[in-house]
Amino acid sequence: MITDQFRGAKDAAALMEEVTGLFSCGDMAEEYMDTFMLAIQQAYFDGKRKNKKYTPKKYRKDPETNQSLPSLN
């Protein structure tokens, strides 16, 4: 059985291979490559922000101090 973590790593590796091929062939203008990379970066941070709400409070960290938040138990 393939775990979600392994499947995600496999998908990421396939995407990296495709993007590397796209950039290395030289058919894409540099300004389009920059725009593409910014879009990927934005998608990454949007997903990270969206998934943050699924982290249980006891595992979240205070954004200012990067320390674990105190437990209310």
Image: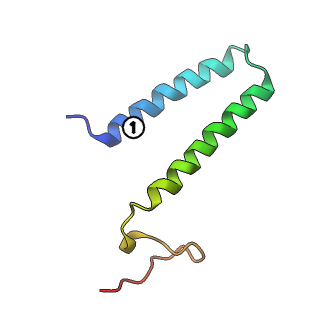
Q: Secondary structure at mark 1?
A: helix
Query: Is residue 14 depicted above or below 37 in this figure?
Result: above
The location of residue 14, given as percent across then percent down, is 46, 25
Q: Quadrant of the C terminus?
A: bottom left
Query: Is residue 3 depicted above or below 11 in this figure?
Result: below
Residue that label 1 marks: 8
The location of residue 6, given as percent across then percent down, is 33, 38
Q: Quadrant of the N terminus?
A: top left
Residue sitting at the far bottom: 73
Number of numbered callouts drawn = 1
The location of residue 53, given as percent across then percent down, is 44, 62
The location of residue 26, given as percent across then percent down, is 73, 15
Query: Is residue 24 depicted above or below 7 in this figure?
Result: above
- Nearest the eye: 39 or 25: 39
Measuring 39% from the left and 37% from the top, which residue is drawn there? Answer: 8
On the rendered structure, is 46 left or right of 70?
right
Q: Quadrant of residue 60?
A: bottom left
Measuring 58% from the left and 50% from the top, which residue is drawn there? Answer: 45
- Nearest the eye: 5 or 49: 49
Residue sitting at the far left: 1
Measuring 52% from the left and 75% from the top, which residue is drawn there? Answer: 62
How dense is the environment of label 1, judged by Cα within 10 Å: few (below 14), some, or many (20 and up)? few
On the rendered structure, is 3 left or right of 21?
left
| Callout 1 amino acid | Gly
